[in-house]
Image (cartoon, rainbow, N blue to C red):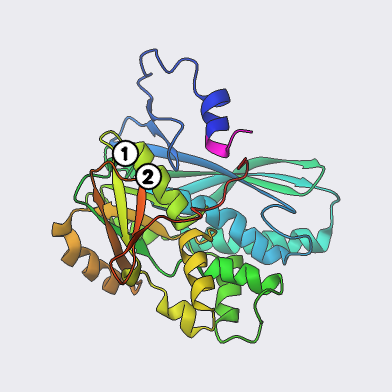
Amino acid sequence: MMNEFALIEHFFADPAAHEPTPPWLRLGIGDDAALLVEENGWETAITCDTLVEGRHFLAGTDPEALGWKALAVNLSDLAAMGAVPTGFLLALTLPEADEAWLTAFARGLFACARRHGARLVGGDTTRGPRAITITALGRVPAGEAILRSGAREGDDVWVSGQPGRAALGLAVRFGELSPNLPGAGEWRAALDRPEPRLALGRRLRRLAHAMLDVSDGLLGDLRHLLERSAPPLLTAEIEVARLPLAPLIAGGAPPERARTALLAGGDDYELLFTAAPGSRDRIILLGRELDLPLSRIGRIVSTEQPPIVLIEPDERRTLPEVLGYDHFRP
């Protein structure tokens, strides 16, 4: 059985990819968004995501929170490219036209849209098992989009905010962790209403070498970044002592559970990026200006090692057991 990314590569790699790239297309499949060339010094970023009931959200999920999240996860892809949102299309599949559900869903959807300056410009509705597909549009100055493919030997590895909260929020929802833990409310909020890091993405133009958003787990998404940036063969050495674990543990998560959630939990929609060591002071200052923690968690090296190596606090070098989520993992 193919995994998610092998499936895309095998069946949906453009058969015309060997032909000259049309002048209107700068970037196609393989990044957080496609990039289309405009004539006025800008590029259009386009991304599409689907949320399916029973896979991405539970039956009975608060529809207002779901409306927010459905748009936010798409805007997060634009943030990862350094793009400014403009509009979006909504394709909504519903088992029935439930007026109360739709009212709440629309309230959350448009709250997120207003907050981030995106307008609903079209879409489709149909009957069937509940699923939400959004195509989001954004703009970025020509040549300034941050791609997954720019990581360089010697780069620092950074992550924004507090990855791991959403996975712990899901554990609370499933009854695996107590809802009375000090951090439980914050974890559930991170799961239900992620905040796309659009301001950070814009400010990292010309500063970050490579970037993506953390949707399938920090280490799994880091692997995608490394794969897109090779050759040469790159390895990310992640220093466990630099991971922002302390807030998760202070919230009541068992240390090993906190570590797994942070490294492989996914659904965080924080930004993971690489930048030159000479940019450290500017990045630290940027985090202060945005009131957003930015953690330097490792470095990129060119070696014959596996793609990701964990450096434990006692300097032991270990390999991660789990990288992240894959819809079609064998």
Mark 1 and mark 2: Cα distance apart in space = 6 Å
Residue 65 image offset from top left, x and y in percent: 65, 66
Residue 34 image offset from top left, x and y in percent: 44, 35
Residue 141 image offset from top left, x and y in percent: 29, 42
Tell me the element at label 2. Answer: helix
**Quarter where residue 42 is shown:** top left
Q: Is 60 or 105 nearer to us in this picture?
A: 60
Asked if labels 2 and 1 touch by Cβ distance under 8 angstroms, the answer is yes
Q: Is 180 or 292 nearer to us in this picture?
A: 180
In this view, the residue farthest toward the top is: 19
Identify which amino acid the numbered label 2 is placed on: Leu
Residue at 41% in and 46% down: 223
In the rendered image, is residue 83 in sight?
Answer: no
Residue 225 circle label = 2
The secondary structure that dominates the magenta segment is loop
Magenta stretch in the rendered image? 1-5
Q: Label 1 crowding class (10 Å Cα cut-off): few <14, some 14-19, many 20+?
A: some
Residue 304 image offset from top left, x and y in percent: 28, 41
Q: Is residue 191 above or below residue 85?
A: below
In the rendered image, is residue 236 in sight?
Answer: yes
**Quarter where residue 103 is shown:** bottom right
Task: Identify residue for label 1.
Answer: 229
